[in-house]
Amino acid sequence: MAQEIIELGEAHRAAAVATLAAAFADDPALTWIIPYRAARVRRLPLMFDWLFDDHLERGLILGTADCGVVTMWRPPGQVHFRSPLYPRHLLHLVQIFGANLLRAAKVGDAIDAHVPGGERLLYLRYAGVRPDRQGKGLGGTAIRAGLARAGELGVPSCLETATASNVGLYQRLGYGIVREWDVGGRGSPHFWTMATTD
């Protein structure tokens, strides 16, 4: 029986961050940004803790109560928002990415350039399943819950993925490929931009 998908909040922070950090430990884009796995494992909890704050403030976090699956969404009106790079934000990004900050910025800029235009979208920014819960349909269940929100809002959903094996899953959930693109640079990740229709 599928677990209920709920809106996650501050009480779920630690478990949600741990799930996302583990789920993205070998993500192609993050592997390119932070090539050494030990450094990635150490830095990804910092990144997802920062993103948790961002989505509590201007997004939506859906998952199971035990955070076996966690999804982060940007709602209409916040899809293309980027925090201004005040000194405190820049310092925090240096703490997360260290010497790899320019690569992180390059990936972020490339993603921003390929997100479909306009704000009438529900943007799936991250979706991760804890490794011990993978293969049980939790990811699809959580994404369908997000798509139900998109239906309530009367908007399509979009996403980007750099994981080839995820493309078929997203297609089965109703996403179609809008475009494929590369970040650019030696060994840089290949992305698929995908979207649903109204």
Image: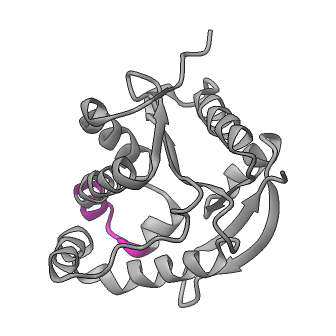
State the predominant SS element of the stretch in magenta.
helix
Would residue 154 be counted in the magenta stretch?
no
Between 190 and 58, the one nearer to me in the picture: 58
User: Looking at the picture, how far across and down is residue 162, in whole percent?
Assistant: 61, 64
User: Looking at the picture, how far across and down is residue 91, in whole percent?
Assistant: 16, 77
User: Looking at the picture, how far across and down is residue 177, in whole percent?
Assistant: 81, 62
Q: Residue at x 74, y 43 (%)?
A: 169
In the rendered view, would you say 16 is above or below 116?
A: above
Q: Residue at x 45, y 74 (%)?
A: 32
Say left or right for 57 vs 94.
right
In the rendered view, would you say 101 is above or below 92?
A: below
In the rendered view, would you say 92 is above or below 10?
A: below
Q: Which residues are magenta?
A: 33-42
User: Looking at the picture, how far across and down is residue 108, in whole percent?
Assistant: 47, 76
Would residue 35 be counted in the magenta stretch?
yes
Q: Residue at x 78, y 73 (%)?
A: 179
